[in-house]
């Protein structure tokens, strides 16, 4: 089995952590911001130094390609993103890019023979933190979103459109460079877990079988706003009290469905939200995810069966959006799992609860993801952390899985 | 018994409803806004037409005084406010001013003999909707707030200070015109109930014995923010779930204390409040009011005894502010109750759950309030309503109670 260089891998993470550095351990590296452009420039320089040819497509996605021995073969691609959320960490996204680069660097420096060209790519605006929605560029490439509509999206809290930021970035290339089936044969996306399972179960590698399906609802309680000092309790139709009751009821009902189901009431809006007024209106979100769409159907049923009157308030709901469970490619999964085991790493098959570009790519190319542990399960925060050993082990699995694909495909 | 003129009383309410008219039945008449200045100008014109002398003090409070037969006697004053909340109604505040003016008009037109001078006054900025806090001017007069600090208060959502608005209003008068003990002997404040009790119990007049005491707390739940898709339910420390549990527990515990206790969880703050992130922090308010401070002590005890750990989240609380129960003057209460009964109106003694300028004034002068019914108990909303009969009956009680005080004091 081949091994990447642990120090070199750590140096890459450390070096990129300065692009958008907040001085508190984390970064804000919004898509196409100065910090993002600095990270992109560094990536280009490092890739070219390895002899990789760097091009971009019309949405600013970057492709750095190392030639293979057989020029007629399709490329194997490792992809992820360089942008972060506001007050994010040093691993989410960039780890996939840099472990790909480290795999390429190992192949180059150790002159490891490989038949297919190897591409390492950066997706533009995966987080959606500056320009909504998330996974914008892979969504455009896969026909989920219209490019012109996306170019018109205005940044959150600002005035610049995605198109303007793109044009100013210097990264607008040719549309024919987009990821496609004619030139590529397999997609790998390494990532941090963003959850506590690997750490809690003391495992080194997650072999990601797919991305779980998801339903999103708004649940609305409508009562009557009235004066906090003058309305006896028995006359009240308090929408926040009704929402509290409904949140606990959802925990009871959904909690009984399946231990792998995750559900979240993450956002709440209360009106008028004044401490001297009984709340007349509360809306909260419900996000539920499970790999088995049958379990999600039970979630929907539970929502539909919620009582329509809660403490005198009218309950209603709106389906917001959802996605079906995505399954990754079994052959590629075998390479990842085989590499992990051959390296002597503990691993398990698991599903991703969060969305990744791989879920769109999987509709076009055989795709797979692998996870490394996240300390305390935390991500999208400045304290996001994976250790030098963990990031190195993930890169080792990636390198060997890619080389296995290179032999077999 | 004397009677005011129902049509004239209704005309006053209708006329003043155009100052700040929203076209939907309600008004926005923020303190010292153009609409408020128009209402003040109309008040001055009407008062002067009745032969009243109109002056203002250094905080823009307006005093319109009708001479009595005995120039040596102190004045009886009827006061309330002309400002409204945003999207408020046509009765809260202005009803007290206009019923006072109607009482004066009845005395003038019917040449009713009276010994004391009668003053009708407008308090500046009672609502606090433009300049916080509420009851600002009566608070300044009673030494609760420092005038210079209040003049520096910047309007909510804008840039103008209270002092600037005051100076531009044309209503800055002499500080020696302020309400005081040397020149005044009794304070009456008619108001709408702002609650459902009179209507529900089919009563015409509320004889307001005082303003209930109050405690205000922030209750805080601290959990851990984590990813909605990747954190198994059993690992979560969801602050919104914990808040929901705590809200219901407060309803259980406080609901068992006393049927006259009112308590409200009106305002909630959830962080980060994103639908894909488990809430890590929730703060909500608790406002509790009761005339018996012993019951409020039990509320405080219940808060202190809340569990400190709720679903893995740390519960803490902060006392925000409170007020002791204020009792109004028994002699004046007797005049109000006596007038209502002599007029053949049904009435009951009750406490005000909301704050009014009278609560500050009661520390300086014998004070009293009377309530008329509010349709559906609603106030601080455009649908706030009291019928022509109700506003007239309140004015009749006021007139006769004032005349009774005039005889006795």
Image (spheres, coloured by chain):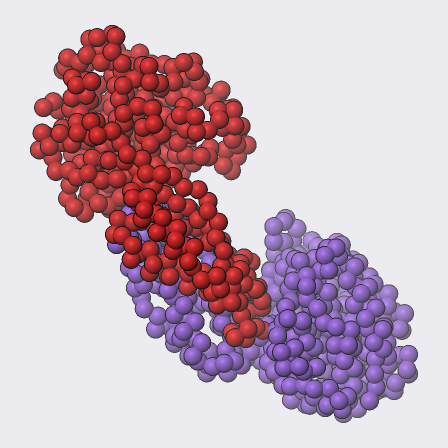
Chain colours: A red, B purple
Q: Residue at x 40, y 25 (%)?
A: A142
* Viewer-proximal residue among B133 and B231: B231
Q: Decide if residue B53 is on the left or right side of residue B182.
A: right
Tell me where residue A101 sits by quadrant. top left
Q: Decide if residue A313 is on the left or right side of residue A118.
A: right
Tell me where residue B220 sits by quadrant. bottom left
Task: Please determine whether, in this image, residue A299 is positioned above or below residue B317.
Answer: above
Q: Decide if residue B374 is on the left or right side of residue A205.
A: right
Q: Percent position (x, y) of residue B142?
A: 63, 73
Q: Answer whether residue A238 is visible to the viewer in this image.
A: no
Task: Please determine whether, in this image, residue B162 is positioned above or below residue A54.
Answer: below
Image quarter hosting the N terminus of chain A: top left
Q: Percent position (x, y) of residue B30?
A: 69, 58
* Viewer-proximal residue among A384 and A267: A267
Q: Residue at x 38, y 15 (%)?
A: A177
Q: Percent position (x, y) of residue A181?
A: 33, 18
Q: Residue at x 33, y 32 (%)?
A: A359
Q: Percent position (x, y) of residue A35?
A: 39, 28
* Viewer-proximal residue among A234 and A160: A234
* Viewer-proximal residue among A293 and B225: A293
Q: Answer whether residue B89 is visible to the viewer in this image.
A: yes
Image quarter hosting the C terminus of chain A: top left
Tag count: 0
Q: Residue at x 29, y 57 (%)?
A: A256
């Amino acid at each position: 089995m081949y091994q990447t260089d642990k120090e070199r891998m750590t140096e890459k993470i450390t070096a990129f952590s300065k692009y958008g550095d907040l001085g508190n351990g984390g970064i804000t590296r919004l898509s196409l911001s100065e910090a993002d452009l600095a990270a992109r420039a560094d990536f280009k320089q490092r890739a070219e130094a390895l002899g990789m040819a760097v091009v971009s497509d019309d949405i600013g996605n970057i492709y750095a390609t190392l030639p293979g021995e057989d020029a007629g073969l399709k490329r194997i691609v490792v992809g992820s993103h360089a942008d972060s959320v506001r007050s994010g960490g040093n691993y989410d996204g960039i780890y996939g890019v840099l472990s790909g680069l480290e795999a390429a660097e190992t192949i180059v420096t150790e002159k490891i023979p490989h038949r297919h060209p190897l591409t390492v790519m950066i997706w533009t605006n995966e987080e959606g933190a500056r320009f909504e929605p998330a996974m914008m560029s892979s969504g455009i490439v896969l026909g989920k979103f219209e490019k012109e509509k996306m170019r018109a999206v205005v940044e959150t809290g600002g005035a610049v459109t995605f198109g303007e930021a793109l044009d100013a970035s210097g990264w607008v290339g040719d549309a024919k460079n987009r990821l496609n089936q004619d030139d590529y044969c397999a997609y790998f996306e390494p990532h941090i877990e963003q959850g506590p399972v690997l750490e809690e179960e003391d495992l080194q590698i997650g072999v990601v079988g797919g991305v779980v399906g998801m339903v999103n609802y708004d649940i609305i309680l409508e009562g009557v706003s009235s004066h906090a000092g003058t309305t006896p309790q028995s006359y009240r139709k308090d929408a926040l009290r009704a929402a509290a009751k409904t949140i606990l009821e959802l925990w009871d009902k959904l909690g009984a469905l399946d231990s792998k189901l995750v559900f979240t009431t993450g956002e709440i809006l209360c009106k008028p939200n004044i401490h001297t007024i009984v709340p007349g209106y509360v809306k909260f979100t419900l996000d539920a995810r499970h790999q088995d769409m049958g379990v999600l159907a039970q979630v929907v049923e539970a929502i539909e069966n919620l009582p329509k009157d809660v403490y005198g308030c009218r309950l209603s709901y709106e389906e917001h959006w959802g996605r079906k469970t995505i399954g990754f490619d079994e052959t590629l999964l075998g390479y990842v799992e085989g590499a992990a085991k051959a390296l002597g790493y503990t691993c398990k098959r698991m599903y991703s609860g969060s969305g990744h570009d791989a879920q769109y790519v999987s509709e076009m190319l055989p795709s797979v993801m692998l996870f490394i542990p996240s300390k305390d399960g935390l991500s999208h925060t400045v304290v996001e952390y994976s250790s030098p050993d963990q990031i190195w082990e993930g890169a080792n699995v990636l390198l060997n899985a890619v080389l296995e694909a290179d032999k077999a495909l």
